[in-house]
Image (tube, grey):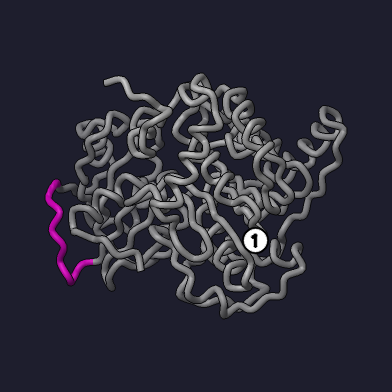
């Protein structure tokens, strides 16, 4: 059915937007931003790029800034249960009313050619820009990339580099160095580099600095974090979350904002190593890098893994990493063309000599980990009727 994008509600509009694409055309979102930038003023932009840890890093930072009475918007993706999760404003997910106000503004501002061509992520990024106008800070999480990501259409004042590893190779590069370079070329002024698994990242940062100087005649500053145990952080946070928190603290130091560690204690990290109940943990991780940090949290334990995977992810490597802690795997059913075929997944599970099941039945005496993607966590929460993020 043909929809008039100039009159469609936001829900109708996004239903007709491309969610996944094979190539990136940066010119569309750039042209759109050129028009929007004439109408609004953006706050100080903190751009978060990396492979893993962007969502928790952004939320730690936005939460703290809000607690210190700054006006802040945190833009992240994807969402788990509801679209509003992507735009967090001053302590809460954006309201439907404010989303509609921003949507109407863009509908009236942008010509139909741009409205037609903008992707789902590009359009929602523009919504976030509009909603952050006249705030103090915009905490802006990149999507899958950096250099040609829609979030990079605006100049960033400060860039936070979270852990970088192999993921989205078809877009970003085949090696950690290539991926790091693609992400880091989004930096405009200064980058803070957080915890890294691969030594290549540090070397790549220096190479990117030279490229930016040669190609853009711009000198950027690089600060690498070397200490990750300097602060006594709340033990309720998983080890990898503490490393992300150290990056946030370094950012706050750069911003000359005083540190009160107690202000982090009530942060809500939906789906990031979240204890749903005493025996159920949910995590939206989906790649080998995420598996490596998760397996350390369950050391010397045996868990039932509730799992599924996109077919373009290295699910075999993920399961190899998690094998020492797996007692059994329950394959959660997902209706999505991007999901690996069930027989292919079962074949890998069998090759790894792991037990599998298709029935989700929670036993209070067993420990469960729900892991594999945002989609896996969403489906599990829907199945158990979960509707409270607190």
In the image: residue 62, left or right of residue 192:
left
Q: Mark 1 Cα within 10 Å, few/some/many (few <14, many 20+)? A: many
Q: Which residue is mark 1?
A: 247
**At which x and y percent is residue 35?**
64, 31
Vertical placement of residue 157 versus 155, above or below: below
Q: Quadrant of residue 335?
A: top left
Residue found 60% across the figure and 53% down from its top: 139
> Considering depth in this image, is 349 or 14 the residue closer to the camera?
14
Does the rendering let one see residue 219? yes
Up/down of 346 relative to 299, above or below: above
Q: Main secondary structure of the magenta part?
A: loop
Magenta-colored span: 358-366
Measuring 46% from the left and 53% from the top, which residue is drawn there? 292
Q: Residue at x 63, y 26 (%)?
A: 31
Asked whether residue 359 is drawn in magenta, I would say yes
**Residue 28: horizontal and vertical position, in percent?**
58, 24
Work out which quarter of the rendered image holds the C terminus and state it. Answer: bottom left
SS class, disc 1: helix
């Amino acid at each position: 059915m043909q929809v008039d994008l100039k009159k469609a509600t936001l829900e109708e509009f996004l239903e007709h937007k491309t969610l996944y694409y094979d190539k990136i055309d940066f010119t569309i979102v750039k042209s759109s931003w050129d028009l929007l930038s004439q109408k609004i003023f953006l706050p100080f932009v903190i751009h978060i790029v990396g492979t893993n840890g962007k969502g928790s890093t952004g939320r730690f930072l936005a939460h703290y800034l809000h607690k210190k009475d700054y006006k802040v918007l945190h833009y992240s993706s994807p969402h788990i249960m509801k679209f509003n999760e992507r735009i967090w404003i001053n302590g809460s997910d954006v309201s439907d009313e404010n989303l509609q106000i921003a949507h109407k503004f863009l509908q009236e501002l942008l010509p139909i050619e741009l409205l037609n061509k903008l992707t789902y992520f590009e359009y929602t990024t523009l919504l976030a820009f509009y909603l952050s106008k006249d705030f103090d800070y915009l905490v802006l999480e990149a999507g899958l990339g950096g250099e040609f990501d829609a979030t990079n259409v605006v100049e960033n004042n400060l860039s936070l580099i979270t852990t970088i590893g192999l993921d989205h190779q078809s877009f970003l590069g085949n090696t950690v160095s290539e991926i790091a370079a693609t992400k880091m070329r989004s930096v405009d002024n200064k980058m803070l580099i957080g915890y890294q698994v691969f030594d290549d990242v540090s070397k790549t940062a220096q190479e990117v600095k030279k490229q930016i100087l040669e190609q853009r005649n711009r000198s950027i500053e690089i600060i690498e974090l070397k200490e990750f145990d300097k602060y006594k952080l709340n033990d309720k946070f998983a080890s990898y979350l503490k490393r992300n928190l150290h990056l946030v603290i370094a950012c706050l130091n750069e911003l000359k904002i005083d540190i009160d560690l107690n202000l982090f204690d009530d942060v809500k990290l939906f789906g990031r190593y979240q204890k749903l109940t005493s025996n159920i943990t949910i995590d939206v991780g989906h790649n080998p890098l995420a598996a490596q940090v998760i397996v350390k949290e369950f050391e010397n334990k045996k868990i039932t893994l509730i799992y599924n995977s996109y077919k373009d992810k290295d699910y075999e490597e993920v399961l190899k990493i998690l094998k020492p802690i797996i007692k059994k795997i329950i394959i959660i059913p997902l209706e999505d063309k991007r999901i690996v075929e069930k027989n292919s997944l079962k074949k890998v599970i069998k090759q790894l000599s792991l037990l599998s099941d298709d029935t989700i039945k929670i036993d209070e005496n067993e420990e469960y980990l729900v892991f594999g993607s945002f989609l896996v966590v969403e489906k599990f929460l829907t199945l158990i009727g979960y509707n409270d993020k607190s």
